[in-house]
Image: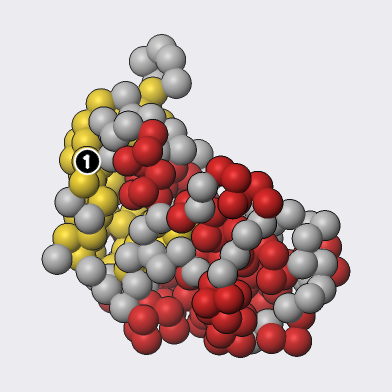
Amino acid sequence: MTILHVDNVRKTYGGNSYALDGVSFSVEKGEFVAIIGPSGAGKSTLLRCVNRLIFVTSGEVSVNGIAVTGLSNPSLRRLRRTIGMIFQHYNLVNRLTVLENVLHGRLGYKSTIAGTCGFYTASEKNRAYEILHAVGLHEHIYKRCDQLSGGQKQRVGIARALIQDPTLMLCDEPIASLDPSAAKIVMDTLRDINTRLGITVVANLHQVHVARDYATRIIGVNNGRVIYDGLPKDLTIDIIQKIYGSEAHDLILADGDTHGTH
């Protein structure tokens, strides 16, 4: 079953320069796809086109068989319930508790009045407790989010996405701001929800070795174009150099020679 289909998508912010230039691929249910590439390659733009935080200039994006680009606002709101989004800088309300931030993931199911007043059912609250236990945050449920570490904040973001009951999880550089220990916990959490819950994950990652360790498939992007789409084991040094250009040497060294393949 195809969860995400991107067909010849282009995005320009004016002039003749494309942030995305004819990007096409499909993602099947249960895949863990890592999108890698240098800064400015178009990775974040691509993810934001999927849930229409950004409009495409041309081409088509479909999620769960529904074309995203032409949806009315009510229909888009319904579709976004099925798409979890994890942000690099968490996008939490720091003055609110962990529990309150997680419950915000249910706002797409609420009327404006219910959402504004913070009306949540007992079953929604119980579900939030369950998810926070599952991501290892049960001891922090009533803490304000500004009291948490970066890794804990990112797990709150994951929990907030999970309470939506998504079929697709989009992760935009989810570990870019984290130290290696916190990054491992976050990536382990994403892999767990992918394998245990069957939720499809598409994650932008800068670190090649992390993409290799966690993804079932890697898409390499540079200058808004897909350079590579295949298995992690087939990602050779030569391909990494095509994806990253001048950045490749430092990445390969940091990656321990990237398994030494050519």
Residue name at image x 66 percent, y 57 percent:
118
Who is closer to the viewer here, 215 or 227?
A: 215
> Relative to the observer, which residue lies in front, 36 or 157?
157
Residue lying at 67% horizontally and 77% vertically, measured from the top left = 182
Residue drawn where x is 76% and y is 80% of the image: 140
Number of marks drawn: 1
The quadrant of the picture occupied by the N terminus is bottom left
177 displayed left or right of 235: right
Residue 109 % position (x, y): 46, 55
Q: Residues within 10 Å of mark 1 (few under 14, many from 20)?
A: some
Q: Describe the element under mark 1 as helix, strand or loop.
A: strand
Amino acid beneath label 1: Ala
Q: Position of residue 174 (x, y in %)?
A: 56, 62
Q: Is residue 105 above or below residue 152?
A: above
Rendered residue at 22%/55% (across/down): 64
Way the structure is coloured: secondary structure
User: Residue 161, image x and y in percent?
Assistant: 51, 64
Q: Residue furthest left?
A: 1
The part of the image, by quadrant, that contains residue 166 is bottom left
- Can the viewer see residue 140 in this picture? yes
* Residue 224 visible in the shown view: no
The quadrant in which the C terminus is found is bottom left
114 displayed left or right of 138? left
Q: Which residue is mark 1?
A: 67
User: In front here: 4 or 215?
Assistant: 4
Q: Which of the two residues, 188 or 98, is positioned nearer the viewer here?
A: 98
